[in-house]
């Protein structure tokens, strides 16, 4: 998989993750509390965390290299 394909797939999966989190928050009633306390930037933060997570998962799946490997010996 090329880097561009990995970026596109990570973006799509992050969007789906955001929608699922939003749906869960809406159905449980937490959406008003979350938006009042963290506003839009908190929602963007969740999106960026989801994007980073999915990008790491796809990269690790493709290359077999775990990015957060400890360098201690």
Image (tube, rainbow, N blue to C red):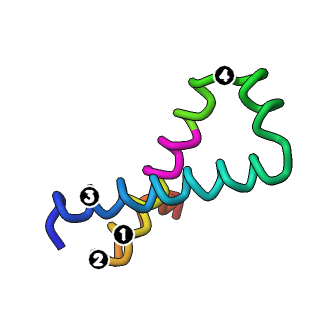
Q: In this view, does 51 lie above or below 3?
A: above
Alpha carbons under labels 3 and 4: distance apart: 27 Å
The percent coordinates of residue 19 (x first, y second) are 56, 53
Q: Name the residue under label 4.
A: 39
Question: CB of mark 2 within 8 Å of CB of mark 1?
Answer: yes
Label annotation for residue 8: 3
Dividing the picture into quadrants, the one containing residue 1 is: bottom left
Question: CB of mark 2 within 8 Å of CB of mark 4?
Answer: no
Dividing the picture into quadrants, the one containing residue 32 is: top right
Q: Name the residue under label 2.
A: 62
The residue mark sitting in front, 3 or 2, is: 3
Alpha carbons under labels 4 and 1: distance apart: 30 Å
Which residue is at a point 71% across and 24% down the rendered structure image? Answer: 38
Alpha carbons under labels 2 and 1: distance apart: 6 Å
Mark sitting earlier along the chain (3/4):
3
Question: CB of mark 3 within 8 Å of CB of mark 4?
Answer: no
The stretch in magenta equals 46-51
Mark sitting earlier along the chain (4/1):
4
Mark sitting earlier along the chain (3/1):
3
The percent coordinates of residue 17 (x first, y second) are 54, 58
Label annotation for residue 58: 1
The percent coordinates of residue 73 (x first, y second) are 52, 64
């Amino acid at each position: 998989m090329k880097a561009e394909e990995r970026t596109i797939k990570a973006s799509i999966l992050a969007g789906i993750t955001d929608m699922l989190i939003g749906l869960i928050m809406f159905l449980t009633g937490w959406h008003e509390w979350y938006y009042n306390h963290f506003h839009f930037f908190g929602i963007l933060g969740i999106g960026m965390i989801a994007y980073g997570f999915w990008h790491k998962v796809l990269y690790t799946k493709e290359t077999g290299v775990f990015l957060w490997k400890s360098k201690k010996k």
